[in-house]
Image: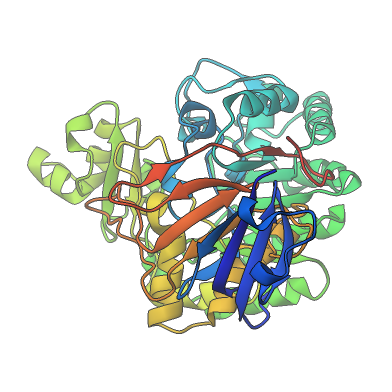
Amino acid sequence: MKVTLLHNGRVVDGSGDPSWTGDVLIAGDRILRTGVGLRERLPADIPPDEVETVDCTGLAIAPGFIDAHTHDDAIVLRDPDGLPKLSQGITTVVTGNCGISLAPFVTDAAKPPLNLLGAGSFRYPTMAAYRDAVRAAQPSLNVAALVGHTTLRFAAVADLSQPASADERARMAALLEASLADGAHGLSSGLFYEEAYPAPADEVTQLARIVARHGGIYATHLRSEMAQIIEALHEAGDTAFEAGVPLVISHHKCAGPANWGRTRETLPLIDQLGARQPVAMDVYPYVAGSTVLREDLVDGVIDVMLTWSDAHPEHTGRLLSAIADDWGVDQKTACRRLQPGGACYFQMTEEDVERVIAHPRTMIGSDGLPHDRHPHPRLWGAFPRVLARYWRERQLFTLEQAVHKMTGLTARNFRIAERGLLRPGMMADVVVFDPARIADTATYDTPISASIGIASVHVNGVRAYAAGPQPLVLQRAGRMLTRGTPDAV
């Protein structure tokens, strides 16, 4: 059995409690002990010469970061090394967000918003089939999967411009029930997207009641993050409350210049909802979002940067305004010519981002889109950016609170067992980083760039990543995590 002693580091255990200087002893895939002077107090059955001691002086030792909001469903199979996430200190990804999950659906079509997960990815008729595929791929990251409401609609609803019929609802319910029985952590919705927008609240509530029976959670990309955001928050809160299921509000923002500053309204409302039911939210630490290229998001005011285009890939990475000027057309016309595609939308203000990220209910999620040709920099830099910009520079919270937002809080809200804390008996997902140096290097111009300051990452007790001249995945040891099971191989 492999035994590793992380010695003399600043132990930030993920609970939000004060950190302390000491040791973390890893044996096999679990944390055996934490404390001070463990090198001199090894268990009797562990010979000292069999212990690999890692000097962590000047470094922080924390639970592996948990990415609360990803679209990594397919990339963990296509590129199981997972370097964009592992190099940030991320050890677990929550997939199936915004109503879009690979399972349970099979199709060759790459229709939006399914194309956020990449073309040719939908090959899994059941969550069990997807689970088996993840296990076979042996990714570097642990995977906790949600079931997407939009995916269920594609699988069961004949006309996506209409609410589901009674028979179609029954079909969606059966697919969801089976997926939850196979270990999915809950349901997500993306009512913002055209394919789900026609669904009334009671269509989602009916499904969320099934999730409640299985002890799962409900995460939602709100129907509106713009002018109707208050109404959308009430809808989400009522849906979860009536179903009796915990609510996670995905990538909370107030989008568009007309809505800047409205976090002064939304955050008190979220706290009001949280007084009657479990409510959490996630956020990415940037003022730009990223999704498929949509004409309704092109207003001629905010900057829009093209992340991919099948029709004109040569313009990838350019601003839509510059492309429109070259073509002598307005931006909406340029948007139509570039379809299908994706874009970054600079639709938030920094003051709102800071209010959301500092809120005690907020977890950190990257919301990165790994299949984009020129991705948003959050894919490679979200978690170190929180520590560099919002902890170290802006001092919006303590280091302990920052790590809690990335670990223990996320594990609790998504009901991910035995992870998120550095405690004896917990799974040994651990990141060692330099608090004085950790920072993102990915930018909008150069988005594919590993962060600095991450010394090493352990996944299930295996040293999976080590910093160096070239970031390197040493060994893949990730697992498919199933709801209600402490651990899954």
Name the image quarter holding residue 233.
Answer: bottom right
Q: Is residue 65 above or below residue 374?
A: below
Query: What residue is shown at x 45% (from left), y 76% (from top)?
Result: 58
In the rendering, at what x and y percent does residue 457 appear? 52, 53
State the residue lying farthest toward the top. 108
In the rendering, at what x and y percent does residue 43 appear? 78, 61
- Left-right relation of 47 to 95: right
Query: What residue is shown at x 50% (from left), y 68% (from top)?
Result: 56
Report the quarter where the C terminus lies. top right
In the rendering, at what x and y percent does residue 18 appear? 64, 83
Q: 112 or 448, which lies in front?
A: 448
- Report if residue 221 is visible in the image: no
Colouring of the image: rainbow
Report the quarter where the N terminus lies. top right
- Left-right relation of 142 to 241: left
- Left-right relation of 315 to 276: left
- Report if residue 480 is visible in the image: yes
Q: Is residue 293 above or below residue 226?
A: above
